[in-house]
Every structure is written in structure tokens, then in C-alpha cells.
Image (cartoon, rainbow, N blue to C red):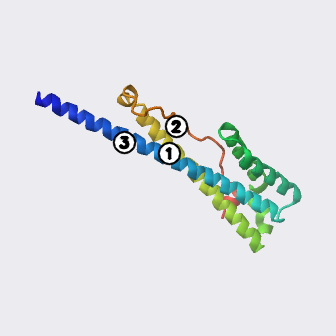
Amino acid sequence: MFVTIAVLAALGVYLSWTAGRLDRRHARLEASRAVLDAELLRRSGSVLDLATAGLLDPATSVALADAASRARTASEGVERYQAESDLTAVLKAALDDPADLEPLRSDPAAEAALEELAMACRRAAHARRFHNELVRGAVRLRRKALVRWLRLAGYAPMPETVELDDTVPRGLASE
């Protein structure tokens, strides 16, 4: 009788600990998603700043501003991540060659704008990797048999990774 009570108490403590762990993981996921969204907005804002500063040729400025505006106004989900990937493609097309950016680097305002954009690109890429790592950990925990059988995750949706192209253009990465 004593052994049965001890086993049930240990199982209860384990389940309570696991449910708490899962709840904390979901809270961290929400926070990391908010950080990722903020970093993506910062990146598109930096692109808009560079595009409207009059430092680039008009065609490049218009292409960058258009892609950044689309990324900022896209609805959540697949459309947003496609717009962010499109912004990365435009950034790579415009700023991938370090030799093309050399004339800009002599201007202190342009150098500051490029540095800000480079930092925003790196931070967005880092935030996405961090968020996806948290998602993978939460999915591993939610796939455990006891978590599924006892529905310890409640009705929370299964977290999903954020898949988009956030490659930093070579022209910015060389700093």
C-alpha cells in the first residue's frame, strides 16, 4: 500500500513538473515569436530608411522600398514569411556585391545606414534560429507519450517553425 501511494505521488509530481515545463516552454515561444516579429519589422524599417535616404540609385531604392513595404503590411502566416523572403531576395540582388557598396562606404551617413541594416539582418536571422530551436524543443516535449495521452498541452496549438530566407547579403556580411 505504501509503495503504491509513493509511486502515485511520484507520478503526480512528475506530471505536474512536466505540465509546468510545457507551460513555460509555450510562454517562451510566445516571447520569442514577439521578438522575431520585432526584429523583422526592424529589418524592414532599416531597408526603408536606406531606400528613402537618397543614397542608392532610384530603381534600387524603389525596389527596396516596395519589398520592405510589402513585408511590413503582409498578413500573418505564410504570406508574411513569403514577403520577408522576397525582401531578402531584393536585398541580395541590390547589396550582395561588396564592390558595389564601396562608393557608399566613403559617405558616413551611408556607412551608418548600411551598418544599421547589416545589424538588423543579423538580428532577424538570429531571432528566427532561436525561435525555431524553441519550437523543436516544444515539439519534442509534446510528442512524449504521457504528454499526449494525458493532454498536458491542453488545447494549445502545436507550434510551428518559421521558414523564410533571411540570408544576410554578402555586401553587408563583409563588415
Mark 2 or mark 3, which has the lower sequence index?
3
Q: Is residue 41 above or below residue 26?
A: below
Residue 70 circle label: none
Q: Is residue 80 above or below residue 112?
A: above
Residue flagged by tag 1: what amino acid is it?
Answer: Leu
Residue flagged by tag 2: what amino acid is it?
Answer: Pro
- Asked if residue 62 can be seen in this view, the reply is yes
Question: For the residue labelled by badge 3, is the local secondary structure a helix, a strand or a loop?
Answer: helix
Residue 29 circle label: 1
Q: Which residue is mark 3?
A: 20
- Left or right position of 25 against 2: right
- Please name which of the two marks, 3 or 1, marks the residue nearer to the observer: 3
Residue shown at the point (77%, 66%) measured from the top left:
102
Q: Which residue is mark 2?
A: 159
- Left or right position of 43 against 30: right
Q: Is residue 67 above or below residue 4?
A: below
Question: For the residue labelled by badge 1, is the local secondary structure a helix, a strand or a loop?
Answer: helix
- Please name which of the two marks, 2 or 3, marks the residue nearer to the observer: 3
Residue 16 at x, y percent in the picture: 31, 38
Q: Quadrant of residue 107?
A: bottom right
Mark 2–mark 1 Cα distance, whole angstroms, equals 8 Å
Residue shown at the point (75%, 74%) measured from the top left:
108
